[in-house]
Image: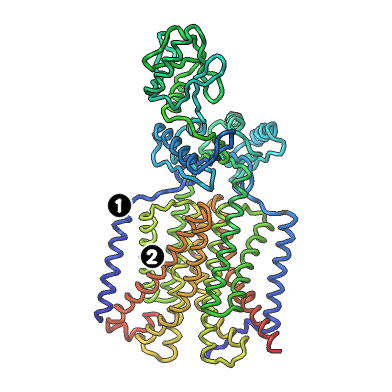
Amino acid sequence: MNIKTQYKTAFIVLILGAAIVILLTYPFRFGLDIRGGIRVTLQCQKVQGVEITDDAVRRTIEVIRNRIDQLGVTEPSIYKEGTDKIVVELPGIKDPEKALEIIGQTALLEFKDEKGNTILTGSALKNAKVEFDQVGQPMVRVEMNPEGAKIFADFTAKNVGKQVFIVLDGKVISNPVIKEPITEGVGVITGKFTIDEAQKLAILLRAGALPVPVKVIENRTIDPTLGKDTMESAYRNGIIGGILVILFMIIVFRMMGLVADLALLMYIILDLAVLKLLNATITLPGIAGIILSIGMAVDANCLIFARMREEYAKGKTPMASLDSGFRNALRAIIDSNVTTILAALVLYIYGTGPIRGFAVTLSLGVALSMFTSITVTRTLLENLLSIPVFKKATKLLGL
Amino acid sequence: MKREINFLGKSVRRFFLIISLLFLVVGMVFFFTKGLNYSIDFQSGSLLYYKLSSPLTSDQIAKIRNIAKSLYEKATVQTGSEGKEIWIRTKFLNEEEVKKLSSEVEKVLGRYDGKELTTIEPTISKELREKAILASILAIIIMLVYITVRFRFDFAIAAILSEVYVLLATIALFSIFQLEVGPSFIAAILTLLGYDINDTIIVFDRIRENMKQNPKENFTSLANRSINQTLARTIYTVLTTLLAITPLLIWGGSVLKPFIIALYFGIIVGTYDTIYIALTLLCEWKDLHSS
């Protein structure tokens, strides 16, 4: 075994070790089609006086994030799509309908006088929480910030005996009569609330109103049980498929096939490890794609081995056949893979969500399978050919 | 010397070229008359899906159909897995309408194992489609440039035509059998384009190598020899790839079935069209020029 082969072997073992560590420590991130949950796309709506700027969309996302944090969803994902759309993904959520109501409501709170002039809006609030009155009826207690408190104190002092209208998204929710000036900046909103409604209102008021109103244009709700069944079946069938490929390679290429199988196993380990490392979302078609790539990963090996057999048939030694087999096949492998990666790059730059994810997994599979089917296979074969027995046993080797 | 199979003889290649084109013609007739069976992702509307542990009775199905129709005249109700799955598809419903529909349907169903709801507005689906088309066109141009640089322009054109063929043929298949076209269909098409170009380039590479050794040789015989020389690899790769997904095709369940069918079909067509689209067209082109 020459020194170069030793270095390569050490390098491969190192990478494999790192991949296994990653595989054992990092979790997979499964898509909504597997985990269940909801995905909604919201579109910002044009209303008079409000421009849909990048900043407005960003602030809207911020408010939605605040609201979702209060729902206690793990790993929510909220991002902007296009110019005016916001995608919200909540994996594994139990009560999707409630979540949807909280996400999409504008929640613009206004305090108005009898003539309909706005005195204060929700932005003057510091806090909101649910309390109960003497008869156990829930109500929402709001605390104003100092400026808000001052304005409200002035207003209530001048309007004793008149009504104040508390309006949420254009609907009057309560209209108490001012009995005395309210100076400490605390108010209660009563109405015919259930506890749930009061809690929802408190969340909305704490998180603030959306800078622009939004409309739900896409809504996907998936039960967690559904995807799990399909994934388990895909997983089982993937393993069977992998075993079929492994057996096929051994039958056709004998020892060389076994070497390719080892490289294939390394490919699977590396591919899964990098997917975990990139925190890529694994969807059902994604799993099918990974399974397909297992079949495609040995393509380079088939090409190389077929070429090695050709060279060997011309009368070359096993080592020389190995060398010229790899050299001649390499050109074709590089050309075809570079073409695929270039196309994937374009898809990544110009595609949308699922297409981009696909481009990443596709190029990853191509790049990794090039490494395993060329470098790893070659190093293993060099090691094998350094054992004297195999220099003679070409039939067993598969040449 | 092993005997060569004559893939590219004039009558053979023309026969297969005509067959290939005929398939496309039939496919396009279906495409323009029946269209594609788009999943909800490419149309607007609402889709409610339930999975049950015991089959629905025809009485239950009729009741559900009535509920759906009362909300939307053209609603469709489909069942699968011997009545253990049901899909209710309507126009785009707002949240309240969805709630009304699902609560009424759930009253009829009683217990169910799983539920899935999808509602989509037209703008979303239109954008998805347009972006996918734009990205594909750009990808094709990039491939055209790369193959021209590494090989030749006429090779690049032939390779792209074989890509277009596998694309159209898969669309034709889906139109003829009315298989569902969803987001995974796009993923399948993209995978197939990658597979197809891979197969084409491996044969092109062998032609390039042979051309260097025998620059004077007639193109058709040179191409034919190259196909024969790479035939072992071609067969092995098709077999390993198909072997990997065969269990999924057989036992994979309804969700992934259209995806796997597209892959299966496209892998075979992608291999076939290297010979009977890309190389056949190149041969015809060379013959036209030498005469």
Whole-percent x, y for residue A103 in the image: 49, 34
- Work out whether residue A178 or residue A11 is closer to the camera in this orientation and state it: A178
Q: Are marks 1 and 2 on the same chain?
A: yes
Placement of the C terminus of chain B among the 4 image quadrants = bottom right
Q: State the SS at label 1.
A: helix
Residue behind mark 2? A267
Whole-percent x, y for residue A37 in the image: 47, 40
Quarter of the rendering containing residue B227: bottom right
Residue at 55 percent of width and 73 percent of height: B145
Q: What amino acid is labelled 1 in the image?
A: Thr
Residue behind mark 1? A25
Whole-percent x, y for residue B242 in the image: 52, 65
- Work out whether residue B174 or residue A253 is closer to the camera in this orientation and state it: B174
Q: State the SS at label 2.
A: helix
Question: In the figure, is residue A321 to the left or right of A84?
Answer: left
Question: How would you rate the neighbour count of disc 2 (Cα within 10 Å): few for under 14, some for 14-19, many for 20 or more?
Answer: many
Q: Is residue B67 visible?
A: yes
Scheme of image coloration: rainbow
Q: What amino acid is labelled 2 in the image?
A: Tyr
Q: Are marks 1 and 2 in contact (CB under 8 Å)?
A: no
Mark with earlier residue (1, 2)? 1
Whole-percent x, y for residue A241 in the image: 46, 61
Quarter of the rendering containing residue A268: bottom left
* Vertical placement of residue B244 versus B84, above or below: below
Question: In the figure, is residue B59 to the left or right of A162?
Answer: right
Quarter of the rendering containing residue B190: bottom right
Instruction: Give the CA distance from mark 1 to mark 2.
Output: 18 Å
Residue at 42 percent of width and 53 percent of height: A280
Question: How would you rate the neighbour count of disc 1 (Cα within 10 Å): few for under 14, some for 14-19, many for 20 or more?
Answer: few
Say which mark, if any, is on residue A10: none
